[in-house]
Amino acid sequence: MKSDRIKFLVFALVVLLIPLPLSGGYLTNVLIFVGINSVLALGLNLLLGYAGQISLGQAAFFGLGAYGSGVLTTAYGLNPWLAMVVVAVCVALFAFAIGFPVLRLKGHYLAMATLGVGVIVNIAFNETVELTGGPSGLSGIPNLSIGSLTFDSDLKNYYLVWVFALGMILLSLNLVNSRFGRGLRAIHDSEVAARVMGVNARLMKVQVFTLSAFMSAIMGSLYCHVMTFISPNSFGFHFSVEILTMIVIGGLGSVYGSILGALLLTLLPEMLRTFQDYDIIVYGLLLITMTIYLPGGLVEGIPALLRRLVPAKKVTEGSDA
Amino acid sequence: MELLNQVTQFVISGLATGSIYALIGLSFAIIFNSTGIINFAQGEFVMLGGVLTIFSLNVLHLPLIAAILVAVAVTTVIGLVFERLAIRPLKNATPLMLIIITIGASILIRGLVMLLWGKDTQALPAFSGTDPISVAGATLLPQHLWIFGVTVLVIIGCRLFFNHTISGKAMRACSFNRRAANLVGISVGRMVLFSFVISAAVGALAGVIIAPLTMTAYDVGVMLGLKGFCAAIMGGMGSGLGTVLGGLILGTLESLGAGLISSGYKDAIAFFILLLILFIRPQGLFKKGETERV
């Protein structure tokens, strides 16, 4: 437990210090999105990696957060912080309500149902034109501010997003090592066995689903205030698959794996500019090859590789975070 | 009278798209029954059918029949390769892994088609002209007749294959109990491969006959695949009449909803029905519930 705390502190320190040598350049901007994607990936990982319940509609919760905050602050002039709280609570309630019928389903049916929810929400973004601006998007969303401090530069936004992200990462780390986290893992292994052992599987699945929706919605709100412009394309099926790819690459059932996956998949398209739309070919290949050859993701693969390369020295890095 | 004509028109076009959903649903059910896999790349087979026909027609300058045969054959080979490379290497795969792999295959195929043929929407010329036929105050396109005809033929073909050939019966045996099928000497692996081959061919054929009506592009597979799945779910994942009825009901409801309520929400209607069925009758509309085996 103590080593976990040290690990987190080192991680947090690195996160907080990284932008200093970058002096607010382009890379800082990219790292903002790494922060947002990390939390989205983490939310899905709690659900999929820990509890074993797939969701192909995560982008919908992210989008509801973004559109909720966007609409409330532009059309109704609500205070952005208040809007963020209101929207996150509403999205969580929505997830809780649909969670009961949706999570009764298993495997393929669950995947299809969450996909269906995602598609319906995305169609709603496109069709409620008078509210959301439809396919052409919603613009003029204000930046967040505290007193006289307005989050209008990449550096300020970096710290804004990452303070939230670090908070949620810490929360998740504590959660997965708690009674709740053990319950989730028990459901993953066998739902029937977990229930026999006194785990309220049905409720816990809905709870973790709600939590992941809540986290995604908060990130959606932050995203819309950072970008000041949103359009339905950012919240479609494609993005849900991208989040899934992140955690498959990073490592299912690993908090730091989610962050690693988010980092790689956010940096990859930036580094390979020529790819543009063709990044889905790479994602497709990654999903297939990783699942077949490295189902534990990179957090398991890298230490294993190190052990093979350095047989004499014992590598003590744990991969169980 | 005006409204009645409109409704007839919506029902006719609904039945036509419904037939397509039925075929796609059938192709889902064929794989599901022999492997327990819901193939998320199923829609891509449908897309490939249409796109490859257009390619063979416009670039290779093949006659229509040859173009269709080439498209279906190539898609079938892709289905075969897909099973060999992505499904077979997995031993003791969990449903979760299979979902992720088939999603991976789906976006991989879509990306490759986009890379090779671009993002443009293309149309396939109708098989036998576009002169409308008047029926009960509504118009019927010759392509509609092609769709109905091919659908009926495929359904009869499947029925004969699964009930009256050794291979078909062996595949059904696998769907009842893989272990027992293996014990009586059926090569389960080969049957799984067969199911991907047949399913890819049926999917591609559906894509070919719908292409003249709705146009086609690299990204049409997702929606068509999902609606086909919806049809299969309504029919309880069987490869029989239930799925066909499911497809026809879905197509008709969607067409009526789009025409009478709002066309923007057309796709949402299908997913709403999908969710409703999954929540209320996950065993399908026409089947009795089964108790879950642990």
Image: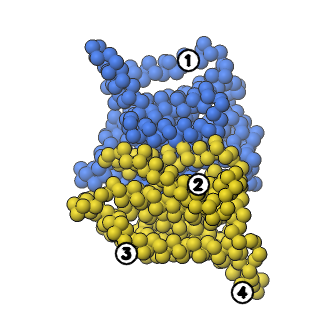
A216 relative to B62, above or below = above
* Image position of B131 (left or right of A86): right
Q: Which residue is mark 4?
A: B136
**Label 2 vs label 4, nearer the camera:** 2
Q: Amino acid at mark 2?
A: Leu
- Disc 1 marks which residue? A18
What chain is tagged by disc 4?
Answer: B
Q: Colour of chain B?
A: yellow
The local crowd at label 3, few if under 14, some if 14 to 19, many if 20 or more residues have their Cα within 10 Å, is: few
| Residue sitting nearer the eye, A14 or B87 | B87
Question: Which comes sooner in the sequence, label 3 or label 2?
Answer: 2
Is label 2 in contact with label 4 (beta carbons under 8 Å)?
no
Task: Give the chain of mark 3.
Answer: B
Residue drawn at (38%, 35%) of the image:
A294
- Identify residue for label 2: B48
User: Chain A takes which shade in the image?
Assistant: blue
Q: Which residue is mark 3?
A: B164
User: Secondary structure under badge 2?
Assistant: helix
Label 4 to label 1, Cα distance in Å?
72 Å
- Neighbour tally class for label 2: few under 14, some 14-19, many 20 plus, Cα within 10 Å: many
